[in-house]
Image: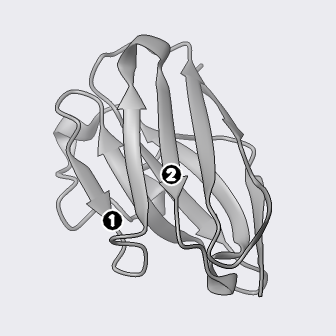
Amino acid sequence: EVQLQASGGGLVQAGGSLRLSCVASELTSDDYAIAWFRQAPGEEREGVACIRSSDSSTYYAESVKGRFTISNDNAKNTVYLQMNSLKPDDTAVYYCGIDTRPIYWSLDNNWNKFYRYDYWGQGTLVTVSS
């Protein structure tokens, strides 16, 4: 079974930066998509960014475009989320999820559907103070 390990959260002041990491193990395919979602208290889980391993195509929520960058290191089965210019509204638990068969459902306009992701990491807390 695929496993995901998320890390890198912490406390940072507004305007600061953090880099999250998501390491995948027990992968059975070279073509998968990993996305970061976040969930603030009392809020629904929200898609933040996604990257596909086969061609490194990326997708972002409008709220993070220009501030967050998702990237991958396929040799390490690791996806990173570089978060710059952080705002208090970015405070949430961040989860990484993996879609192990993205070929069956286009990521375009659908990457942020949480139910397309088969496995999830444990979450890492990001707190941005004002």
Q: Position of residue 96 (x, y in %)?
A: 57, 47
Say if residue 2 shows up in the picture: no
Query: Given this view, does label 1 or label 2 mark the residue nearer the observer?
Result: 2
7 relative position to 95: left or right: right
Coloration mode: one colour
Disc 2: CA contacts within 10 A as few (<14), some (14-19) or many (>=20)? some
Residue visible at 28% across and 59% down in the picture:
59
Does label 1 or label 2 sit earlier along the sequence?
1
Identify the residue under disc 2. 82
Residue 90 position (above or below residue 83): below
- The secondary element bearing badge 2 is classed as strand
Residue type for callout 1? Tyr
Residue 65 placement, left or right of 35: left
Residue 123 at what x, y percent from top left?
73, 50
Residue 69 x/y as whole percent: 39, 54
Q: What kind of residue is marked 2?
A: Gln
Q: Residue at x 42, y 73 (%)?
A: 64
Q: Which mark is residue 60?
A: 1
